[in-house]
Image (cartoon, rainbow, N blue to C red):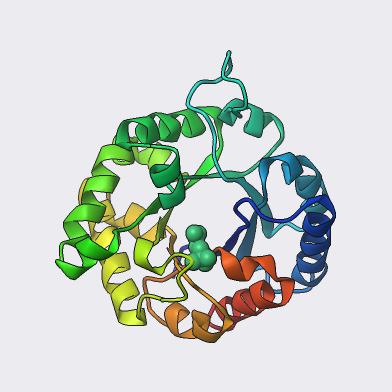
Amino acid sequence: MNRQLIVAGNWKMNKNLMEAFTLASGVLAKAKKMSNKVEIVLAPPAPYLHTINSMSKNIAHVNIAAQNCHFEPSGAYTGEVSAEILHSMDIAYVILGHSERRKYFQENHEILAKKVSAAIRAGVKIIFCCGEPLEVRESNTQESFVLQQLEESLFHLSETEMKQVVVAYEPIWAIGTGKTASPAQAQDMHAFIRTQVATKYTTELADACSILYGGSCKPSNAAELFAEKDVDGALVGGASLKAEDFLQIIQARAKQA
Ligand code: PGA
């Protein structure tokens, strides 16, 4: 396999300053000694990005992600952070399209398409989230739902730009619910996404595109998810808030590298 294996921790709006540094230190101390075959990504709340990025600078297989960015490079947008600012801080990734941003902050496909372009323009790689709600899964229309998300907000990128994108499949019914997609459900959707990337771009690009699973990924189910051939890693929420759990998920990925 010629694609990057990645385990990313999305801390969301959790951890105060001291807790955040304790968690980051705990993960980084162990990460240093772990296989460099797995790229580890930490996505802390924005105020901690700079310090945690500095803390991780000497570990080549660790990168930092922001959880959001604005689509304008700068301007009168109180409270927002641009991709340019992230780039100036040497932040490698930004998570875009997360279902919580779509739901609570009304990020529709047009806004997301603009954010995707803005990140690429600024030189920040993207972890692009997609995934269906429960009613879509129950009506068995998840493939067309996810394809629409990709077409509307991601597939306007050129082939060169698309190489800067990691896709995260996160079925909404599995996020924070304790309910994980079965390995077969994850594999089916990952294979579908890869096929769509191949159809839109090239087979080579699709083969090299890392596709992560997200939604109640934890130490007890990580290995079986990673055993699927199109599951290249995970975007982990709840279980990334405990260093031990997150490290176990990274280890599970490393074992099957
Ligand atoms: P979860 O969150 O692991 O807590 O389900 C995943 C995510 O939202 O990225």
Residue 201 seen anywhere in this rendered image of the structure:
no
The structure residue drawn at horizontal position 37% and vertical position 31%, both measured from the top left corner, is 111
Residue drawn at (32%, 31%), measured in percent from left and top? 110
Give me the residue at 69% from left, 29% from top: 88
The N terminus: image quadrant: bottom left
In terms of image quadrants, where is residue 97? top left
Residue plotted at (62% across, 74% down): 250
Residue 187 visible to an observer of this rendering? yes
Q: Nearer the viewer, residue 59 or 144?
A: 144
Relative height, residue 18 to residue 107 (above, below):
below
| Quadrant containing the C terminus in the rendered view | bottom right
Q: Quadrant of residue 214?
A: bottom left
Q: Please state the horizontal and vertical placement of residue 137, each as a whole percent of the image.
A: 22, 67
Q: Is residue 12 toward the left or the right of residue 160 in the image?
A: right
Q: Quadrant of residue 89?
A: top right
Residue farthest to the top?
A: 76
Task: Report the number of numbered marks.
Answer: 0
Is 193 in front, or is 42?
42
Residue 185 falls left or right of residue 84 = left
x then y, percent, for residue 116: 42, 35
Indicate whether 133 appears above or below 78: below
Q: Establish if 85 lies above or below 213.
A: above
Q: Position of residue 85 (x, y in %)?
A: 65, 28
